Image (tube, rainbow, N blue to C red):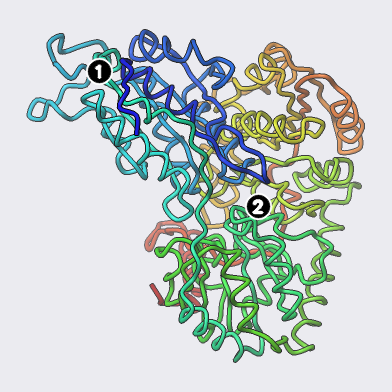
Amino acid sequence: MSTQTVQLTTAQAIIRYLANQFIEIDGTEMRVCGGGFGIFGHGNVTCLGEALYGVQQELPLYRGQNEQSMGFAAAGYAKQWLRQRFMFCTASAGPGTSNLVTSAALAHANRLPLLLLCGDTFITRLPDPVLQQLEHFNNPTLGVNDAFKPVSRYWDRITHPAQVIQSLPAALATLLDPADCGPAFLGLPQDVQGWTYDYPETFFERRVHRIRRISPDIREVADAAALLKTAQRPLIIAGGGVQYSHAVTELTAFAENHQIPVVETIAGRANMLATHPLNAGPIGVTGSDSANNLAETADVILAVGTRLQDFTTGSWTAFSQDARFISLNAARHDAGKHLSAPVVGDAKLGLQALDAAMTGFKSPADWVQKAADERKTWDAYVAGNIACGNRPNSYAQAIGVVNGLCDKRDRVVTASGGLPAEVTANWRTLDIGTVDVEFGYSCMGYEIAGGWGARIAQSEREPDKDTIVFVGDGAYLMLNSDIYSSVLTAKKLIILVLDNGGFAVINKLQNNTGNESYNNLLADCPTVLEPFAVDFEAHAAAMGAHAETVSNPSELGEAFKRAKAADKTYVICMKVDAYDGWTAQGHAWWEVGTPHVSGSDKVRTAHEEWEATRSKQRRGV
């Protein structure tokens, strides 16, 4: 082994290492890090900026407008690449870095790879206190960057240049681990970034990585197969992990071989085409009557690649008390939830092993027919729900128009408010892996930023397809600056801004729990003294996008055609009704905290009605 060394700064070593890490995808080797998003400040410009300047082709740096949105964009990029590639985010010390905490939480909740290279205070403490430093009187080691510990899968503060020899491979291993995937945070003190060390040349040798596939234990497979064979009404819940494992083919084959209906989680949308005869629809709080009716009577449920979030389980009221669960998951933590029979391992390998162990088993024909009948009824409801006519404009109508006109490989992105429920329920999947409904953290502002990141990734894979963003007026106003980013970088987005005059879905929840409308819709904010409608078209145009406003779904369809033909980001704005047009069917119970006492009869009645369903809630852990 070579003993040659090279003297580099800490920052130079980090960037040189990243530039030499590759991954094999479909027989092609490419850099595992697709580049980064950055806003420079005094905490990262002089050293990390200097290091990045020399690798502009290898690791392109996208200039951000907001650190939080940079993290969202990196998450959207990682999703589009099915967690096989990631982007880094770099921010200065102080508020630049603290703005990324929400992004890290989103990546953590969604199990997404995100590398954070953030400025930190001086290790020597000689110039303390410095600009943007938070001082803790009794603990000088504590700073803003410690806030990332609960939202990171890997956290380290580099206090000596030699530490990166250990920390960088450990961080990368976390980012590429199917079970432990999530944000990796490296705090980079401003002095240490520029300190030098004689690094071994071997540390920077080109290395090709592969995503690990863990074979499940044969005994766990045998136990799961034995349980599943007892089922008279089996059901598969397909989560986002199915796509991350590239197990869509195996999922479909398993379902077909054993004639088991499949329902999808929010993250698992687009695991199967809408037209597949065993696709029974989305499950849960934002699901479908077809999926939820099956879940209510299923006796054995195979959950694949899902963390069984409350919107999937209806806060654990969506299933029979006697139903038995099998959880196939790369993460032990998820595989053992709710007294599941665990199968810890890769979804692709696990489904193959289960398939071999289930030879000869098929669901009873009447159960399969019930699933088909339920889906047919749900499809008829959706067709009516998205239909345009003499009724107020709705999210569902806009979704139906776009669904009918888009290319089957276009990617759909949404995240917060009422749109995740409406897209999940009403979007009919045209091709595998084309839907990104961010509901792990349900983060307002992800929509446009995540769409930009997805579009960067999409342009590396399918540059002739579009990324389509559904965003409400509330999320738009919270974070919209990546319209400008998309124009600057020539990463075209089609953005549908659906304006219902405030935070309408929370207003709906407020009303459904007996409360009066208050502080959600602009019309119901007592501190709003001069209400006016935002000119979203003019605002988007001011950031360089093509933009227009339409009055109804018919005009929306024509505008969407123009957007498809456009050469840059295109924003279409349409008002929708805040009260009418919501998808009324398909909802499972959802636990929210309601007042146990109140001076309002409506609130007390709503509380009693809400609690009446709690008897269905499973008590497993």
Q: Nearer the viewer, residue 463 or 230?
A: 463
Which quadrant does the C terminus fall into? bottom left
8 displayed left or right of 328: left
Q: Which residue is mark 2?
A: 421
Q: Is residue 392 in view from this perspective?
A: no
| Secondary-structure class at tag 2 | helix
Q: Nearer the viewer, residue 147 or 464?
A: 464
Report x, y in % for residue 7: 31, 15
430 displayed left or right of 309: right
* Farthest residue, direction left: 138
527 displayed left or right of 386: left
Badge nearest the viewer, 2 or 1: 1
Q: Establish if 220 lies above or below 417.
A: below
Q: Is residue 140 in view from this perspective?
A: yes
Residue depicted at x 37% and y 30%: 203
Q: Quick check: marks 2 and 1 in contact, CB under 8 Å?
A: no
Residue type, numbered disc 1: Val
Q: CA distance from mark 2 to mark 1?
A: 47 Å
| Secondary-structure class at tag 1 | helix
Residue depicted at x 64% and y 65%: 283
Q: Which residue is mark 1?
A: 192
Residue type, numbered disc 2: Ala
In which quadrant of the rendered view does residue 538 lie? top right
Mark identifier at residue 46: none
Q: Establish if 194 lies above or below 507.
A: above
Report x, y in % for residue 349: 58, 67
First reached walking from the N terminus: tag 2 or tag 1: 1
Mark 2 crowd level (few <14, some 14–19, many ≥20, 10 Å Cα): many
Q: Establish if 476 lies above or below 511.
A: above
Report x, y in % for residue 267: 60, 53
